[in-house]
Image (tube, rainbow, N blue to C red):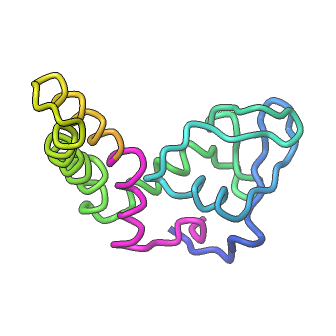
Amino acid sequence: MAKASYTLRNGRVYVHEKCQQPTQVNGGDFEGLCNPFNLCLGTVCAHCGGPRALRTFHWADTGEQLDDYRRRLRTKVPPIYSWWYLWISPLIGLIAGTIIGPLFLNNSSLPVAAGSALVGTLIMYLIIGPKLLMLIAPKKYYQLR
């Protein structure tokens, strides 16, 4: 995987395949778009407006579709990153939700514990887990071509 000179400030340009118009992405949006462990189902075309699926965009400089780019990055990381994202982080959420939910709601019934476990799992998988992963093993995905 080639390292490129992309920066958060300058970002990178992607092209919407339908209208063939470029969009510059930078800053936190660029970092989140490039991080294969952040939940990202789509992005926005500056010309058409509105959200569109990642498969409808490609990088202007390489021609690679954004969803293929993110998939390729996920396959190039050390296995522990994927294990954290897919198994360890959700398991922590499951355990924390099972314990914290009934305590917070002052109700230890099975539906409350199960619902809290599900919420804890989703929060860890979608929000906290990817952020913790970047703190534990910081990788600047946006610098990779």
Q: Give above or below for 46 relative to 114.
A: below
Residue 113 position in % (x across, y down): 15, 32
Residue 61 position in % (x across, y down): 75, 58
Residue 56 position in % (x across, y down): 68, 34
Residue at the limit of the structure toward the top, as seen here: 111
Residue 138, picture quadrant: bottom left
Q: Give above or below for 26 relative to 18.
A: below
Q: Quadrant of the C terminus?
A: bottom right
Numbered circles on residues, count: 0
Q: Is residue 3 left or right of residue 43?
A: left
Q: Is residue 2 left or right of residue 85?
A: right
The residue positioned 16% from the left and 22% from the top of the image is 111
Tell me which secondary structure the magenta stretch mostly adopts: helix
Residue at the limit of the structure toward the front, as seen here: 106
Residue 31 position in % (x across, y down): 60, 62
Indicate whether residue 125 is drawn in magenta: yes
Indicate whether residue 134 is drawn in magenta: yes
The residue positioned 71% from the left and 33% from the top of the image is 51
The residue positioned 17% from the left and 28% from the top of the image is 114
Q: Is residue 118 left or right of residue 11?
A: left
| Towards the viewer: 77 or 37 | 37
The residue positioned 10% from the left and 24% from the top of the image is 110
Q: Give above or below for 14 relative to 121.
A: below
Residue 53, picture quadrant: top right
Q: Is residue 36 left or right of residue 83?
A: right
Q: Give above or below for 3 relative to 112.
A: below
Range shown magenta: 124-145
